[in-house]
Image (spheres, rainbow, N blue to C red):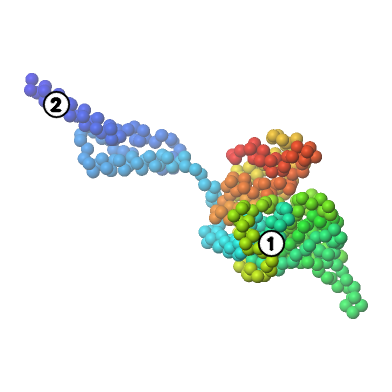
Amino acid sequence: MASSNQEEKLLQERLKNLENKSKENLFSESFEKPVESKIEAEPEPEPEIGPEEVSESEQVIKKSKLKTGIKRLVKPIRKKVLTPPLGVKKLSETEIKWCLGNISKLKKEMSKVILGQEDIVNGLIMGLLCNAHVLVEGVPGIAKTLAIRALASASGCTVKRIQFTVDMLPTDIIGLTNYTPEKGFEIIKGPIFANFIIADEINRAPPKTQSALIEGMQEKQVTIGRKKFHLPNPFFVMATENPIENAGVYPLPEAQIDRFLFKLIMGYPKEKVEREVMETNITIRKFEAFGLKPVITPKEIIKMQLIVQKVYLDDNIKSYILEIVRKTRNKDFKNSEYVSYGSSPRACIGLFIAGKARALMQGRNYVLPEDIKKIVFDVMRHRLILSYKATLDKISPDSIVQEILNSVKVK
C-alpha cells in the first residue's frame, strides 16, 4: 500500500515538472525545427530533454538558443534594401559625404538672399547635379531670377545673364562673324559662352531666337558661320518664365522646352517667410551687398555630376519608370482623353538621372520608388501635350501625372 502511494507521489512530481517545462517553452516543437526551408542560417539542433529535472544554467542556455532561433526565422522577411549587386561598383561613404557637404554649402550660401522656397533651391541644385537645364515658372516678384543668381554666384562659375526681348536675334545669343578692314573676318562670341546662363523671361523671344538655344542646350556646342564651337563645361541654362502675361510673349517650342530637365513651379511664400522678405527688402539693396561667395569650383561640380551617374538604380525601378512614361501614350488611365501626345523617351532619361540625383541628395547610393515619385511632376509636367478640352475643363498636367501614379504600382 505504501509503495503504491510512493509511486503515485513520484508520478505527480514528474507531471508537475513536465508542466513547468512546457510553460517555459522548453518542449515547443515550432522552435525545434525551422518553419521555412529557405533560411539563410538554420538554428542549431537542440538536445533532447528527458523527464529528469533541468538545472537553471541549462535552462538559460536553452532560452538563449530559442531566442536566436526566432531571430533567424524572422530575418528572411525583413524589408529588402536595394543595394548594388556583386560586380557593380557602388559609391563609398566618403564620396557621399563629400557631395552632401558641397550641397550643404551651396544651400547655406543661397540662404543669404533666398528665404523659404526649399523645393526651388533643391530643384536647381538637382538640375546642376544632373548636368541638365531648369525652367522656373512663376508670377513676377517672387525671386525667380534672384534664386538663379544666388546659385550662380555660389557655384564659382562664369555667369552671363540674357534678358530676352521681342526684337532679339539669334546672333545676340550665340555670336556672329564680323569683318573689319584692320583684322579681317573674326568671330565675336555671344553671351552663351559661359558656365551659367540666366535666361530671364525666356518666353518673350520669338521662336526664331529660341532656336539658337536648342543646339547649345542639347549638344553643348553652337555653330557660328561654318564653324562649331564647344561651350564651357559645366554648362547650365536656368530660365525664367512668366505664366500670366499674354502680350508680347510666345509659347516655347516643344523641341526647346523638352530640353529642360525640370520645370519648377515657384509659388507664393508663407506668411512668416514673407514677413522676413519684407524686412530684408532686397529691392532697395544691391545683390553684391549680401556678400555671396563661391563655395565650390567648376571641377567639383563636374566631379559631383560623375558621382551621380554611379548611384545604383535597380531593374524594378527602371520598369517603374518605363511604365509611368508609357502610360502617357497607352492612355489607359483616368482622364487619359485629355492627353494629345504622350512623353518622349527623354522623359525616361530624365526620371532615370533625376532619381539618382535625389537619392544622392538624401545620402543614399541607391534609388527608391519614393525618389521617382518626388521628381516625376517636375520632369513630366512640361512633356505632356494636353488637348484644348483639357484647358476648358481646367485639367492640369500635374493632375494627369497624379492619375498615372495612382494607376502604376511598384513591382
Kind of residue at disc 2: Lys
Question: How far across and down, in percent of the image, does residue 274 sit?
Answer: 63, 56
Write down the quadrant of residue 60 in the picture.
top left
Q: Earlier in the sequence, mark 1 or mark 2?
A: 2
Q: Secondary structure at mark 2?
A: helix
Instruction: Point out the image quarter for the C terminus.
Output: top right
Give the vertical position of 336 relative to 374 (above or below).
above
Q: Crowding near pointer 2: few (<14 within 10 Å), some, many (20+)?
A: few
152 left or right of 391 in image: left
State the residue lying farthest toward the top: 1
228 left or right of 144 in image: right
The disc at residue 154 is: none
Pick whichever, 162 or 117, lies toward us: 117
Question: How far across and down, in percent of the image, does residue 173 sit?
Answer: 81, 63
Q: Secondary structure at mark 1?
A: helix
The residue that mark 2 highlights is: 9
Pick whichever, 67 or 405, lies toward us: 405
Judge depth for marks 1 and 2 and give the one in front.
1
Task: Please indicate, yes or no, whether residue 122 appears anywhere in the rendered image.
Answer: no
Kind of residue at disc 1: Leu
